Image (spheres, grey):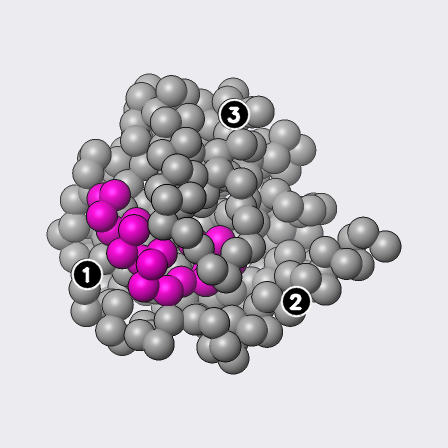
Amino acid sequence: MRLSLNLLLVTTFFFLLANNSFASTKGRMFYEKTGKVFWDVKTNEKIVALTFDDGPSPTFTPQILDTLAKYQAKATFFVIGEHAEKYPEIIKRQAEEGHEIANHTYNHHYDLTVNPANLKRELKQTANTIFSITGYYPSLFRPVGGYYDETIINTAIKKGYQIIMWSWHQDTKDWTRPGANKIAHSVTSDTQPGDIVLMHDSGGDRTQTVQALDKILATLKKEGYECVTVSELLYRSKGILPSPLYLFPTM
């Protein structure tokens, strides 16, 4: 019953978002021009960025890291602060293996009326947690559920973040658990240079995501794609250096 209620709440949230009932009146075109918000990038290089939200998970994140290592692929993990505090060894492993760790708030609340002070506090808590484990402060932020308005965007920018969304055609919707083949197909059927792919390594049973990732990486490798961190994607396509430098994180 609780699972059904949670699914209903999340579905309602995304319905409202899709219909712009509560979203910003300033859309993608406006914010992309600021150079601070990205859905994807234009590049002639066959590079893409795989991103994972809501982790780390003690069950699924290590499996995802194993699969990434198998294909020598890099990814960006948008972590929830309270999860990072619980599983610092996973965050440490992510950094040691050359992946990027980014900010996805501390509590992951689906809140359509964001208070700037609360958002600042969550960003700071998560950033401090990441720093305490890796020695790096994150430079990228992804809003919860991809919801954004002027308050969220401006607050994050003032704190020095680049805001990272995802390519509109690369939302795997893996949280609905449609099957590993469908998740993989949603990525590989229309891969384009500069894509930012959305997946999840926590927040539910991510067995299908783990299975799909192996298929995705095998196909992308066969097609000549390189999987890089978001910061490396921005640097190689736009010459943007994050602050702090987080292209190749080391301990």
Picture residue at 20% right of the left edge, 35% below the top:
245
Q: Magenta region, mostly helix, strand or loop?
A: helix
Q: Which amino acid does the dot numbered 1 rest on?
A: Gly
Closest to the observer, 71 or 140 = 140
Residue on which disc 3 sits: 85
Task: Give how far apart the Cα atoms at labels 1 and 2 are.
Answer: 30 Å
Q: SS for tag 3?
A: helix
Mark closer to the observer (1, 2): 2
How many marks can you see? Answer: 3
Residue on which disc 1 sits: 35
Q: Position of residue 94 (x, y in %)?
A: 44, 30
Residue on which disc 2 sits: 11
Image quarter (top left, top right, bottom left or bottom right) of the N terminus: bottom right
Task: Give how far apart the Cα atoms at labels 2 and 3 are.
Answer: 28 Å
Q: Quadrant of residue 46?
A: bottom left
Q: Quadrant of residue 4?
A: bottom right
Q: Which amino acid does the dot numbered 3 rest on?
A: Glu
Q: Let me know if residue 221 appears in the view.
A: no
Membership of 64 in magenta stretch: no
Q: SS for tag 2?
A: helix
Image check: 218 left or right of 123?
Answer: right
Image check: 237 left or right of 84?
Answer: left
Membership of 152 in magenta stretch: yes
Highlighted magenta segment, given as a residue range: 143-160
Image quarter (top left, top right, bottom left or bottom right) of the C terminus: top left
